[in-house]
Amino acid sequence: MPQDVEIYALVLKGTVDVQGLIALKNDTDANAVYIHWACTAPHNNIWEHNKQKYIGVGGHLLAIAVQKSIEWEHAGVLHADAMDEKLLKHYIEKFNAWSMPISNRPFHFVVEEESAHKLREVYTYDWSEEEL
């Protein structure tokens, strides 16, 4: 993994129980945050295990990306690659992302400023600088 990628964990308050991880890059060329990768804990991964202990983990991970985008002066804008067409459609429907295929990356998407701020209103969390 590139050295310029930062990894953040989503944990339940008062615990060290990781519910999801997200790796972010400050993509100054695109004036956005690039989600290098994101994953939920297996017990929260409906896409692979057909069940979720906690609903909304993915949205909370995207909210972390939006927050870092704001901190890095990209106004909340982010972009990433969904793992497949079904997940891309989910991002489009749930988070108002828009598809932006790039050469060999057919499931590339962007979340623009207005949609990013709405996402942050729905998926709130307490920020901690604590390291796991």
Image: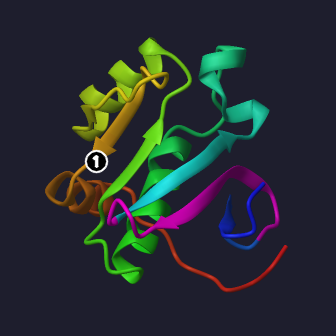
Q: Residue at x 32, y 62 (%)?
A: 120
- The stretch in magenta equals 15-31
The amino acid sitting under disc 1 is Val
Where does the image place residue 17, in percent across and percent down from the top left?
80, 57
Q: Residue at x 29, y 33 (%)?
A: 94
Front-most of 115 and 2? 2
Where does the image place residue 74, in percent across and percent down from the top left?
30, 72
Where does the image place residue 105, in percent across and percent down from the top left?
47, 25
**Residue that protrudes farthest toward the bottom in the picture:** 129
Q: Residue at x 46, y 61 (%)?
A: 65
Q: Residue at x 43, y 13 (%)?
A: 85
Please say whether residue 40 is one of the residues in the magenta stretch. Answer: no
Q: Quadrant of residue 70?
A: bottom left
Where does the image place residue 87, in percent across and percent down from the top left?
46, 22
**Does residue 44 appear to the left or right of 1 in the view shown?**
left
Q: Which residue is mark 1?
A: 111
Q: Is residue 11 above or below residue 107?
A: below
Please say whether residue 21 is one of the residues in the magenta stretch. Answer: yes
Q: From the image, which quarter does the C terminus lie in?
A: bottom right
Give the SS element for disc 1.
strand
Front-most of 50 and 111? 111
Q: Is residue 15 above or below residue 126?
A: above
**Does residue 61 appear to the left or right of 3 in the view shown?**
left
Answer few, some or many: residues within 10 Å of disc 1's Cα (few below 14, many 20 plus, some between 14 and 19).
many
